[in-house]
């Protein structure tokens, strides 16, 4: 991980891990084999109270997940020079990367990103008036040879789960089941393989600094090491999530917050590292087509409850985000609250 004590890793004192861990109490665990009406009710409760939940009996085959987890371990174990052959840069935004920053502090991790649609269509420039479109392509390493097939197979399975979850979320909001489906036709969803190496300064650094996921929802597979913390909405306390074997963690993203006009709010979360064990995780970020105009759904607003956000273009939003890692880092990342309508 480069220079181990690079000051870029050091969190400001108020954002450092706390010495005592608050273990999770009452984090919703949802069994997706239950009847649909019960599920819509449970998911609605989990989304409004926590902004996240765990799912079991989710239909993603265990062997598909295990195949990818073991291929990911093999990939990250390769020498740095080999991983850097599929390195991300300002043009090739997918692939390997070990200098990600969250809110301008460097994360203690290395990642490999690939998109679910290959190629993925996105705006060619950040200019709001420029309609030109460009493509992002996946980059595949030579080793391990199974990585590509493992990634593509897993993506197909998790994508099915993401659609099922969006249908349940639609129902829970009183919308037709398929209300959200149209947004995902030319989706910009991507999957990230995360490796958090043991860290000599776990009290000063974070695997991922506090943030909210900016897309629709996230389906996270994590190993048994633990370290994910979510901010409890009732009191703002950071709560440690205990890994449930073979379950997925679902985060409500910013886009659901906007679509639902804040009936549901996205969850703030971060990742602790430790000095002993490597941790691996695999989030799937469900994102709509680049040409999606994101704004509160008409069904979710009325005279008493006017839209709380101005419309924004998803493609321009993500290209602005991706670009910010390669430009100077003293600018704040684009966030949904920039589109919030003030009272
Ligand atoms: C993320 C994230 C959590 C984890 O990549 O956005 O929150 O457990 N990851 O790796
Ligand atoms: Ni996240």
Image (spheres, grey):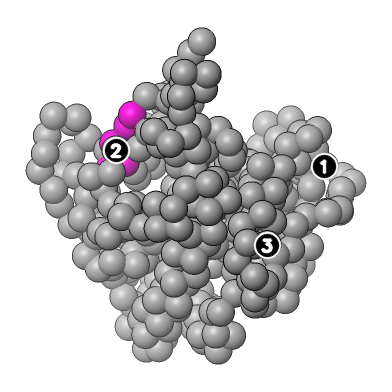
In the drawing, what numbered circle is on residue 18?
Answer: 1
Per the image, label 2 sits on a secondary structure element best described as strand
Mark 2: is the Cβ under 8 angstroms from ligand 2?
no
Q: Earlier in the sequence, mark 1 or mark 3?
A: 1
| 35 displayed left or right of 339 | right
For label 3, count other residues whose C-alpha is less than 10 Å away and answer few (under 14), some (14-19) or many (20+).
few
Residue 271, visible in the rendered structure: no
Q: Is residue 18 above or below residue 28?
A: above
Q: Looking at the image, which residue is at 75% across and 57% down? A: 28
Residue 312 covered by magenta stretch: yes
User: What is the total number of numbered labels drawn onto the structure image?
Assistant: 3
Q: Earlier in the sequence, mark 2 or mark 3?
A: 3
| 286 displayed left or right of 276 | left
Mark 3: is the Cβ under 8 angstroms from ligand 2?
no
The Cα atoms of the two marked residues, 2 and 3, are separated by 31 Å
Residue 282, visible in the rendered structure: yes
The Cα atoms of the two marked residues, 1 and 2, are separated by 39 Å
For label 1, count other residues whose C-alpha is less than 10 Å away and answer few (under 14), some (14-19) or many (20+).
few
Q: Is residue 165 above or below residue 327?
A: below
Q: Looking at the image, which residue is at 68% across and 31% down? A: 12
Q: Which residue corresponds to mark 2?
A: 293
Of badges 2 and 3, nearer the viewer stands 3
In the image, the segment drawn in magenta is 311-315
Q: Looking at the image, which residue is at 25% across and 68% down? A: 118
Quadrant occupied by the N terminus: bottom right
Q: Which residue corresponds to mark 3?
A: 38
Q: Earlier in the sequence, mark 1 or mark 2?
A: 1
| 255 displayed left or right of 18 | left
Is disc 1 in contact with disc 3, using a CB cutoff of under 8 Å?
no
Say which quarter of the image contains residue 235: top right
């Amino acid at each position: 991980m480069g220079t181990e004590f690079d000051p870029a890793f050091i969190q400001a004192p108020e954002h450092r891990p706390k010495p005592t861990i608050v273990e999770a109490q009452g984090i919703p665990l949802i069994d997706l084999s239950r009847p649909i009406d019960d599920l819509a009710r449970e998911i609605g409760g989990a989304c409004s109270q926590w902004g996240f939940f765990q799912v079991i009996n989710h239909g993603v085959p265990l062997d598909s997940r295990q195949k990818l987890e073991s291929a990911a371990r093999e990939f990250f174990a390769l020498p740095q020079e080999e991983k850097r052959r599929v390195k991300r840069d300002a043009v090739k935004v997918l692939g390997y990367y070990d200098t990600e920053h969250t809110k301008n502090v460097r994360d203690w991790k290395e990642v490999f990103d690939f998109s679910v649609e290959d190629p993925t269509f996105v705006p060619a420039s950040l200019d709001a008036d420029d309609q030109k479109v460009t493509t992002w392509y996946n980059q595949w390493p030579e080793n391990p040879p199974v990585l590509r097939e493992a990634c593509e197979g897993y993506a197909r399975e998790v994508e099915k789960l993401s659609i099922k979850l969006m249908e349940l979320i639609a129902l829970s909001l009183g919308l037709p089941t398929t209300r959200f489906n149209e947004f995902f036709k030319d989706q910009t969803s991507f999957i990230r393989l995360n490796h958090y190496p043991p860290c000599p300064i776990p009290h000063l650094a974070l695997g991922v600094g506090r943030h909210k996921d900016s897309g629709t929802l996230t389906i996270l597979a994590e190993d048994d090491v633990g370290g994910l913390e979510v901010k409890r909405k009732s009191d703002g306390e950071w709560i440690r999530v205990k890994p449930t074997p073979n379950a997925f963690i679902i985060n409500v993203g910013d886009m659901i917050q906007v679509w639902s006009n804040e009936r549901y709010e996205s969850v703030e979360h971060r990742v602790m590292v430790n000095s002993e064990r490597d941790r691996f995780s695999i989030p799937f970020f469900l994102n709509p087509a680049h040409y999606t105009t994101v704004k509160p759904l008409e069904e979710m607003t009325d005279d008493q409850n006017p839209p709380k956000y101005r419309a924004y273009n998803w493609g321009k939003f993500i290209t602005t985000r991706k670009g910010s890692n390669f430009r100077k880092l003293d600018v704040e990342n684009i966030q949904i609250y920039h589109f919030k309508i003030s009272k």
